[in-house]
Amino acid sequence: MHVYRALRPGDLLMIEPQAEGGRVAIRQIPRVEGAVVTMDVHTGRVLAMSGGWSFESSQFNRASQAMRQPGSSFKPFVYLTAMEQGISPSQKFDDSAVSYGSWHPNNYEKDFWGATTLHDALRESRNLVTIRLAAHIGIKSVAKIAEDIGLVQNMPHVLPAALGAVETTVLREAGAYASIANGGRKVTPTLIDDVQDRNGHILWRPEGLALSSAAQPQGVAPAGNEPNAVFPDAGQDGDAAHSSQPPVGTAVQGVGEADVPALTDTRPAVSSEASAFQITTMMQDVIKRGTGVQAGKGIDNPIAGKTGTSQDFNDAWFAGYSADLVTVVWIGFDQPQSLGKNETGGTIAGPIWNRIMKVALEGRPKLDFPVPEGVTLVRYDTGRGVAVDAFKNDQVPGGSSSFAAGSPGTGELTAADT
């Protein structure tokens, strides 16, 4: 039991000046730590990073160095694997008790919904549906997506990993979520745009994205072999590169015609655009009326995200994005211990994400997530309310296939699964 007393003259207090009103707020040195990364979903450029409460007290960067369990914020990558295998958001899996040996997984609410669509299961973070889904699609397939997208280095091929029993960093998770927001094309976080010499020639830049003059066909190298800081593929050959006069006999193009840069993206596609958009659409509902409601309060930009809470409430996460920004928040003790009963990612990390994104999105256009070709948005009844999902051309909106008895996905687990 803690006994508190009123402040007295002479007490030493920690205060923080406030931005407005000339006021100060009383602060204390926290025992709980945290980390956050905000980055551009298209380029991977890190726009903001905080690795802890105080660099003076600890130089350990919890955003890039701390390996922590992501909990349910890992689940979207299980569902992304399912979408890649042609399973639709309306597919139903059984939400009922399952056990194997000493492992008895359960839902956070400790209740069962029976046949449940993947949309509802992701929105409300239902563990038992996720386990059955991972068993059906194969945990090795899930591991491949998680590794290819950069979320983990080596994922164990066991079903508990589908619930986030793996280790990653805030920075890695930001890159993985950005890859979903970027249409399934892998996004690697970067803190350095490029390295140039004193003449502006680029010595190094992250691989995958490049600019070239629109007048130059992609893949055709111009005269000269040194990249330029403005147009990395433009020529730098002697005086001709710096001459303001065009060569004799060359037609002069209108202003801006040749100087508009064209973007070349050679980064690998981890999933199809359609599958990534299906996950984005499902995670929009996570924020609208699921476990991430607190993260979306007061934000009218289209946003998508997912909560995450590890075993015994040791880690609280919220990862989410708009059409052009992704932010991941983690809260926990440096030495893993419980944050307290019911201290979930939605209740702790979600409100912090909300405050950060309100500032980050201020003044930015309200961009919708681009709908790729080959998908149709359909409003339908999931059995637990009306939802909007994206369906591929070969999928029946609202439909759900039946799995044969004894097939994967029926809950008949093996030792290899657990």
Image (tube, grey):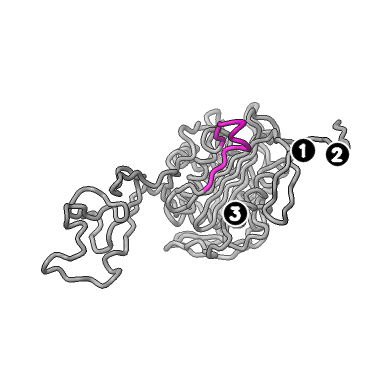
The stretch of residues the image draws in magenta is: 48-62
Specify the quadrant that holds the C terminus: top right
Q: Nearer the viewer, residue 337 or 235?
A: 235
The mark that comes first in sequence, 2 or 3, is: 2
- Looking at this rendering, what residue extends furthest in the bottom direction? 254
Three-letter amino acid code at the position of disc 2:
Leu
Residue 13: numbered disc: 1
Label 1–label 2 contact, CB within 8 A? yes
Residue at 23 percent across and 60 percent down: it is 217
Q: Quadrant of residue 14?
A: top right
| Label 1 CA crowd tier, 10 Å (few <14, some 14–19, many 20+) | few
Three-letter amino acid code at the position of disc 1:
Leu
Describe residue 414's horizontal placement relative to residue 210 as left or right: right
Image coords of residue 110 (percent x, y): 73, 41
| Label 3 CA crowd tier, 10 Å (few <14, some 14–19, many 20+) | many
The mark that comes first in sequence, 1 or 2, is: 2
Q: Is residue 53 magenta?
A: yes
Q: Is residue 233 visible?
A: yes
Image coords of residue 66 (percent x, y): 55, 33
Q: Nearer the viewer, residue 92 or 214?
A: 214
Label 2–label 3 contact, CB within 8 A? no
Q: Secondary structure at mark 2?
A: loop
Q: Secondary structure at mark 1?
A: loop
The residue labelled by disc 2 is 7
Q: For marks 2 and 3, give the one nearer the viewer.
A: 2
Residue 357: numbered disc: 3
How many marks do you count on the picture? 3
Residue at 53 percent across and 48 percent down: it is 38
